[in-house]
Image (spheres, rainbow, N blue to C red):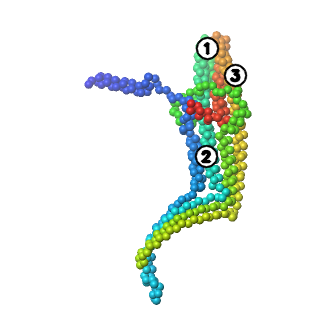
Amino acid sequence: MTFRLKLLIMAIIFTMSLTTVSTAENTHDGTQPQSPSYTLNDLYSMALDQAENIKRAKEDLFIAQKDKQRALSVLIPRFTAFGNYNLGDNDQTTHDPSGSSGYPPELNLKTDSMAWGLRLEQSFTLNGKELIALDISKDYIEKSNFDLTTAKETYLFQVASVYYSVLRASKGWEIATASVKRLEKHRDAVSTRLKLEDVTKTDMFRAESELSDARAKLVEDKNTYLYTKAALRSLVNLPLDFTLQEPIGKVQPSSGFDLEGLKEEGLINRSEIKSAKRLRIVSEKNVKLSKGDYWPTLSLEGQYAKKDESFTGTLDYDQDSSGYLVGVNLNFTLFDGGLRNAEIKQSMAREQQARLVLSEISKQVALEVEEAYLQLVTQKGRLTALNDKLSFSRQNFMAVSEQFKHGLSNSVDMMDANTLLVSAERELSDARFGYKLAFLKLQRATGTFLRETVSELSN
């Protein structure tokens, strides 16, 4: 095989390998694979399965359910079995000169015994303290359910907030990119007119300065976008190259909302308030539970036992015995050094704390509802004005650009027009996403956020 033929074969193999790699990197239709794209509902579904604090709240619920089993086990009699086996060897020497004792002078006795039995025990306080504890465990299960709802709502709203932050940052990056392109085009126009001595060098310096500032803003917006994506990945397990889809549809207008009605809805639906109410009920029952220590404790016991013994040696005989026992015990503490009184005072103080917590949370919920409502109204009011501002800013930039081409405006006018346009675009973008997030915040404040989200996910 000649050298040229070897070289030709190697070239063919190299070309085929490149073709194979290129084909593997493309999809079946010849296009490049696209980055995975997610909607807000997709993020909700993933967050519910991955969030650590939601899993922790589920474990709290599981613990509360097992506490109920523990409280119930106290009401069920305890049934136990016992048994033992003993093996003994006993050597005795009897000194009796008269011989009147009747026992041999040497006695060798081996004892083999086995005993077993069954015991049934039950004790309870005469005021039903054990039933109160069982009732409290049921209340804790309900409280844990409310806490789980709170954890889900809080986490999902956090996901929604970061989701809109990513969209806002992406739009800001897009606006900054468009601004750089406009300023580059303007810089080129100024450079052309400078060669024709139609403008001065100060116009060129101003154009370059504004372009540099826009490029710096572009870098800042890009890094903001990358940071918000990283923040979203920390909340939801997403790949590095993911993209987001903007929500489709309009939110409900705020004109039909009644502020006082929304506050009442929040006070009824918020899981934090439900949890605080349940905690107050538990604290009231804990006072009764502590007072139960002043009541006597009644214990019932039943036992059956059987014992088998065998003796071998000098004397051989067997002995079997069996029997049963039923007993009732009544215990009453006369003096405990003030322990029961201190525990009752502590329970009463915790009850007062629970009432104060409920009052504080109710005020906080009412304030959150009013804040979310006012934010929604504010964002909606800004949308109309900012839409008009963006329209006027675009028309103004186009007009100034045409005037600049014909020498009727200067570079400063162009910079001002571009700044006004960029400002209008950013403000309108923030208002649009802010309005949608404010609507979700109002749902969160009124306690309907999780219900609406689950309804959307199920449809």
Q: Which mark is residue 162?
A: none
x, y percent for residue 263: 71, 35
Q: Is 28 displayed left or right of 303 in the figure?
A: left
Q: Nearer the viewer, mark 3 or mark 1?
A: 3
Q: Which residue is mark 2?
A: 141
Front position among marks 1 and 2: 2
> Real-space Cα distance between discs 3 and 2?
50 Å
Instruction: Name the amino acid, label 3.
Output: Ala
Q: Is residue 320 visible?
A: yes
- Quadrant position of the N terminus in the picture: top left
- Of the residues under marks 3 and 2, which one precedes in the sequence? 2
What mark, if any, has residue 194 been given in the picture? Answer: 1
Q: Residues within 10 Å of mark 3 (few under 14, many from 20)?
A: few
Query: Circle 3 sits in a helix, a strand or a loop, which is it?
Result: helix
Label located before the other in sequence (3 or 1): 1
Dividing the picture into quadrants, the one containing residue 334 is bottom right
Mark 1 surroundings: few (<14), some (14-19) or many (≥20) residues within 10 A: some
| Quadrant (top left, top right, bottom left, bottom right) of the C terminus | top right
Residue 136 picture location, percent across and down: 64, 50
Q: Residue at x 65, y 14 (%)?
A: 399
Which residue sits at x=63%, y=17%? 201
SS at circle 2: helix
Q: Which residue is mark 3?
A: 385
User: Picture quarter containing residue 127?
Assistant: bottom right
Is 237 left, or right, of 344 in this rendering? left
212 vs 151: above or below = above
Alpha carbon distance from label 1 to label 2: 78 Å
Quick one: SS at disc 1?
Answer: helix
